[in-house]
Every structure is written in structure tokens, then in C-alpha cells.
Amino acid sequence: MPELFEILTKEEIAPKIYRMDIYAPAIAQKRRAGQFVILRVYERGERIPLTIVDSDPEQGSVLLVFQVMGKTTAMLSDMEVGERLADFVGPLGSPTHIENYGTAVCVAGGVGTAAAYPIARALKEAGNHLISIVGARTKDLLIMTQEMGAISDRLELTTDDGSYGFHGFVTDRLKKMIDEEKVHIDMVLAVGPAIMMKAVAELTRPYGIKTIVSLNPIMVDGTGMCGMCRVRVGDEIKFACVDGPEFDGHLVDFDELMKRQRMFVEQERKAYEEYLKDKQGKCGEGER
Ligand code: FAD
Ligand code: FES
Ligand code: MG
């Protein structure tokens, strides 16, 4: 029997993007589409939120897919099967509101594809005709295309550099679908970098297409108490960890979100550099 929060599997699925199954039976049982966990790699480490991409209630495992962005994700990627996380709290966040809208288009960028997958799957299971547009900077960074293909009625792949599929941004592909192909779309779900979700919301606004976005502000406690994840949605202030992370994309103040996401970049850069330096030092010692 594995220990609680033990890493059961680990695989690098694209450069600096990993998938890991973590042993967390209670979360695996309870989680619903759109929810996430907050974990700490070690006792004095910071808390980071990661989406629950999938779960296997029988095995008691929760699937994470994450990209190395800085110190904590780098530390996580350096852990091995059999090691255990200091803690792993969830499921957090409001589950996605799922209904049969008709034709739903899931627009996913980069590692956002991992967070989009469980919601897209729930939309498909609710009877929607599901079209997925999955994009990345370049071919090597396109992830979960097989999984997305298996649940979608139609899958379109895009790369910014044209190395695979449609040459351009996911928004360019969506625009073509709306303007040239005249596809009737009842709702759009967008998950990815804030700048991408903003562009999707701006594109769909004049057409009046309902657009849901999954926001990724900095989170600390994940339970609505610290206020770190506050976002402006229309006239209201919301806490993404408890009121979201999904909101009406036409109402979100993306510029404020992006500003707040960059609040600690200097400290984050230093922490990452120090971690890499320490790691190099340790590798060097091992070699001697
Ligand atoms: P750092 O160098 O510390 O930070 C890099 C950037 O990541 C920062 O500039 C900031 O914008 C963001 N960030 C830093 N700390 C946090 C934090 N505590 N909370 C949120 N963002 C932070 N990433 C994935 O790769 N896969 C996922 O499935 C995924 N799901 C997420 C779900 C939610 C609800 C949210 C809010 C974020 C999710 N993220 C996901 C983003 C992930 O949490 C950050 O990439 C991670 O926290 C970066 O930590 P770091 O120490 O490695 O990088
Ligand atoms: Fe603290 Fe949302 S993370 S209130
Ligand atoms: Mg960090």
C-alpha cells in the first residue's frame, strides 16, 4: 500500500512538462471537473495550486500535469516515484457548471490543455458537440492531443511557429471557424495563459458567444481567507479559489489579473536561480 501523497508515476511528456500520479484516495473519490489541489513539496515550502486532470478512484490516485516555471515546480519535477509530498489539499474550487449548451468549443493553450481536459470531457459527457482547439508555441509543446482527440468530435491543432497543424494562435483558428467556416458555436471554454484567454474573450464578445475562462491568479491558502487570488469580475471582487476558478470571460479584468500575477517576479527569479545553483553544487559534489 503506498503512503499518502506518494508519487506513483512520473513521466516527462514534453520538454519541462511532467505528468505525475499521486496517491490521495479521498481526493480521487471526491473530485469533480474544474477542481484543483494545493500542494507543498516540503514542509517549509510554498503552496502551489495544480489542476486535478483526472483521477482513478480504485487506485486512489490523482493525475497532475505541470510545467516547470520556477522553484517549486522544478523541485516537484526533481522528485522521484516512491517519494512523498509534504501535503496535498483538495479538492478545492467550485466544480465547473456543466450543461448541454449545444456546440461547445474548448480552446486550450500550452499546459492549459491539462486543465481544460477534465472540463472538456464533462462537457462531452453532458451531450455537447465538442470541438477542441489545442495550441502551443511549437510542436514539442503540444500536449494531451490523444486524450483531447478521444473526447472531441473535432480536434484542431495549432502552433505559433507553424511546426505542426495550423500556423498561428488558437485565437486565429477560432476566428477562422467563426468567420470563414461559419460554425455555429453556443459556448467557448478557454484555458491557458491570461493573455490568450483575454484574446479569446475579445474575439467572442462581438458575437455574443458565452465564454468561460479558467483563471490562474497567485493562490496561497486556496480557501478564501488570504485574498491573494482576488480578481475583478464585472463590478464585483471575487476570490478565484472559492468563487472560481471559472468565470464569465467577458466580465474579467484581465489586465489587473496579469499585473497581479507578476507581483513577485523578482523574488521568484531569485528563488529559482538559488535553487538551480544549489542543485548544480550538489551534482558537482556527487561527481567528485
Ligand atoms: P514561480 O517562479 O514561483 O512563479 C512563476 C509564475 O507562476 C509567477 O510569476 C506567477 O504568475 C505564477 N505563480 C507563482 N506562485 C503561484 C501560486 N502560488 N499560485 C498560482 N500561481 C503562481 N500549472 C500547471 O503547470 N499545471 C496545472 O494544472 C496548473 N493548474 C493551476 C490551477 C490553478 C487554479 C491555478 C491558480 C494555477 C495553476 N497552475 C498550473 C499554475 C501553477 O500554480 C504555477 O505555475 C506555479 O505555482 C508556479 O510555481 P513556481 O514556484 O514553480 O514558479
Ligand atoms: Fe487565498 Fe484565494 S488563495 S483567498
Ligand atoms: Mg514559486
Image (tube, rainbow, N blue to C red):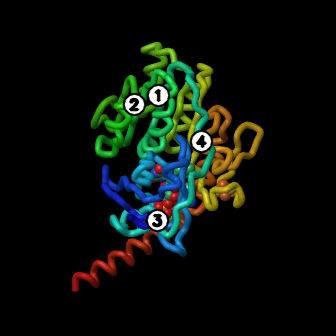
Label 4 Cα crowd, 10 Å radius (few <14 / some 14-19 / many 20+): some
Label 2, on which residue? 151
Label 3 sits on a secondary structure element that is: loop
Picture coordinates of residue 220 (x, y %)?
Answer: 62, 61
Label 1, on which residue? 124
Identify which amino acid the numbered label 4 is placed on. Pro
Q: Earlier in the sequence, mark 4 or mark 2?
A: 4
Identify which amino acid the numbered label 2 is placed on. Ile
Q: Are marks 2 and 1 in contact (CB under 8 Å)?
A: yes
Picture coordinates of residue 61 (x, y %)?
Answer: 42, 54
Picture coordinates of residue 124 (x, y %)?
Answer: 47, 28
Label 3, on which residue? 4
Measured in 3D between alpha carbons, the distance from the residue under mark 4 to the one under mark 3, in whole angstroms, is 24 Å
Residue at 43% of width from left, 59% of height from top? 23
Q: Quadrant of the C terminus?
A: bottom left
Identify which amino acid the numbered label 1 is placed on. Lys
